[in-house]
Amino acid sequence: MPPTLLPLTLLHARGAAAVRGLMRWGHKALQWQQGIVRLLGARLRGGRVAVAATSMDLALDPVLSRLLGVRPVYFCRLLPVRPRLILGWGNRRSGRRARALRDRADGLLLVEDGFLRSVGRRDPPLSLVFDRGGIHYDADSDSDLFGLIARPLDPAQDARARGLIHRWRALGLSKYNARRDCAVPPEPYVLVVDQVAGDLSIAGGGADAATFPRMLMAALRENPGLRVVVKLHPDSLSDPGRRHFDPEALRALPRVTVLACDGHIAPLIAGARAVYVATSQVGFEALIHGRRVRCFGRPFYAGWGLTEDEGPRRGTADLAQLVHAALVDYPRYCHPETGAETTPERAMDHAGLQRALRAAFPARLYAVGFPRRKRPILRRFLQGSQVRFLRHPHQVPPGATAVLWGSRSAEGLPSSARVLRVEDGFLRSAGLGAELVPPLSWVIDDLGIHYDPAQPSRLERILQDSVLDQAARQRARALRDLIVTSRVTKYNLPGDRWTRPPGAVRVILVPGQVESDASIRCGAPDIRTNLDLLRRVRAAAPAAHILYKPHPDVVGGLRDAGADESLALRFCDEVLDRASAADLLDQVDEVHTLTSLLGFEALLRGLPVTCHGQPFYAGWGLTTDRVPIPRRGRRLDLDHLIHGALIAYPRYVSGRTGLFTTPERTVRDLVQWRDRAHRRGRVGRLLRGRWRGRLVTRLRGLRSWLWGRRT
């Protein structure tokens, strides 16, 4: 960067940060205004309310409101209300206020984060605990959790708890789940866990600052042949005053390794011979992983015969009792996408999905040639990696990983660079990408791209090598049923109904494509125009009733029509510009295509498909192929193809939360958005579509002109 531009860049960054800060304060002020209005409304109605909260943050917390089934009113001494239930946050100030006001309500409820809290630290919670007797980290309280742990389990509860233990381990979960894994030392070690100085759970568990050096000395003394790894708390990394250990002093000790990183701790727990804690939740997670745990305080999981304790015994419980109480009975879970209460299993699966996809690609990526409108979308699909945007391939550092759109040439990249290619997924959106409708699904391919058969793609490798168990097959079958019954397609556009002509014996649908599209250039070696395809289909089936459906981008004026496409009626019986794709697939007998995704959608509906090109779904024994692909020798069933193309290969990002989601949830969202769009009215849609098409076309031309002048 030129030195003269550095001050301007810093000024811009500071200005942007200031604007973001003002927006946050403005949002907070608006929330407070809403809370005060609700309080005044309650006073005007006589002051009797269901739930009152002793902090405005609790009163305005949407997750809390969903789990309680009612929105709390803020309890203000100047405008007091008469609640049936008063709630506060743990042992913090609001919790102490709630205890002090207990006599003014019929009941008290203390709230805290659950043990599976969220994906990132700033994300809304996946779980909250509600305690009527105290709070779990206060060993001297009458917390509900202690009674739940002591309660025996029936066989179904025991089996569920053991299933949760297996799930937690397999998904590599922890309280927070956004970070990449900590580095695990190669030699055997025991783990010593620091906590933030002043954390309420330390005093609540009967520990203090002197507990931590005593814990470290015990770890060194009790494990003479092992390395001792001290994990500093992430919140103390930028503030030395919040640590119980001095990293420099620790590094001077023999056999001691200090980990001062904000990495995910689950692999570190799983690899330890033993875990030493004061009151940290890490001890509970270590029990789930089957590790030996030494407790120097009195956390909720100590004193039951599962840990080696410095404190007194509480009772006897096995690990299943502890897990069932802490993960099933005590917390309540809120699904981040639906907002409805959910199960611990579904909450775990959501957090596990985020972890798996965030760690799939290198921590730093270099995206080349992406227009500004696609950059925030790419960041969402590559969350977990830091993405830097570049204009030219030669700017990518040697050995780095570059991200390219589709089949863009990799010429100019360093020879040592890896390449990821990005394209639309097969369940994309409720509208056209050319109309700038944001996608819900993209594919990110580290081998090639699915529509270019010149080299294997990651999808082809999945289909060639994967082995499905019964659960995967059932999931693929259920997803197919959901898509077909919901009448979902790639773009989910509204359309006119079409009626099959009476007496038509054989009806063939030929979907048009954008002839300049990369899938035609790469995957149609024989014929490459829509008219040639129609000519070939008519020659092969002269008596059939042939329908031609032009591509929606062409109909909307967003892409150019193909060569002589206006002559389509010479070789077909009907041209259906605005017919619904799902409606047509319900009535036709077969589909002939070059590489269109409509062929895959026809397979989902059990229709015969003839491929005159080489799309990703050809060559597996499910289609009639006019252009063979010798490399694809494996014979697949439809469940296998669906699992590979719709579950294993793409990524889905929720339009509600911005987090990774599942294809099943995406289909349900697409149905809701499609139906909502259909209710707007056909005339308005057509006018908006044509106006938007012209605008997008002009903007594309302007962008190309500007880009050409800059390069």
Image (tube, rainbow, N blue to C red):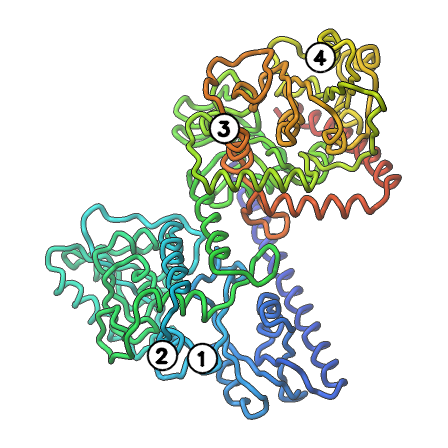
Find the distance from the CA under tag 3 to the CA under tag 2.
53 Å
Mark 3 closeness class: few <14, some 14–19, many ≥20 residues within 10 Å? many
- Locate residue 557, reporting x and y percent: 80, 27
Callout in the foreground (1, 4): 4
Q: Is 639 located above or below residue 622 in the figure?
A: below
Which class describes the residues within 10 Å of circle 2: few (<14), some (14-19), or many (20+)? many
Amino acid type of the residue tagged 4 in the rendering: Leu
Disc 2 to disc 4, C-alpha distance: 75 Å
Residue 60 is left or right of residue 552, and the answer is: left
Which mark, residue 204?
Answer: 2
From the viewer's side, name the closer residue of 549 and 409.
Answer: 549
Q: Secondary structure at mark 4?
A: helix
Q: Residue at x 21, y 56 (%)?
A: 273
Q: Earlier in the sequence, mark 4 or mark 3?
A: 3
Whether 220 is drawn above or below 108: the answer is above
Taking 90 as reference, is 375 above or below it? above
Q: Position of residue 61 (x, y in %)?
A: 60, 69
Contact, mark 1 vs mark 2 (Cβ under 8 Å): yes
Mark with earlier residue (1, 2): 1
Mark 3 lies on residue: 459
Relative to 134, is 15 on the left or the right? right
Q: Which mark is residue 533?
A: 4
Residue 151 located left or right of residue 476 = left
Can you identify the residue that label 1 sits on?
Answer: 91
Q: Residues within 10 Å of mark 4 (few under 14, many from 20)?
A: many
- Label placed on residue 380: none
Query: Which marked residue is nearer to the observer: mark 2 or mark 4?
Result: 4
> Do labels 4 and 3 touch, CB within 8 Å?
no
Task: State the separation of the CA atoms marked 1 and 4.
Answer: 72 Å
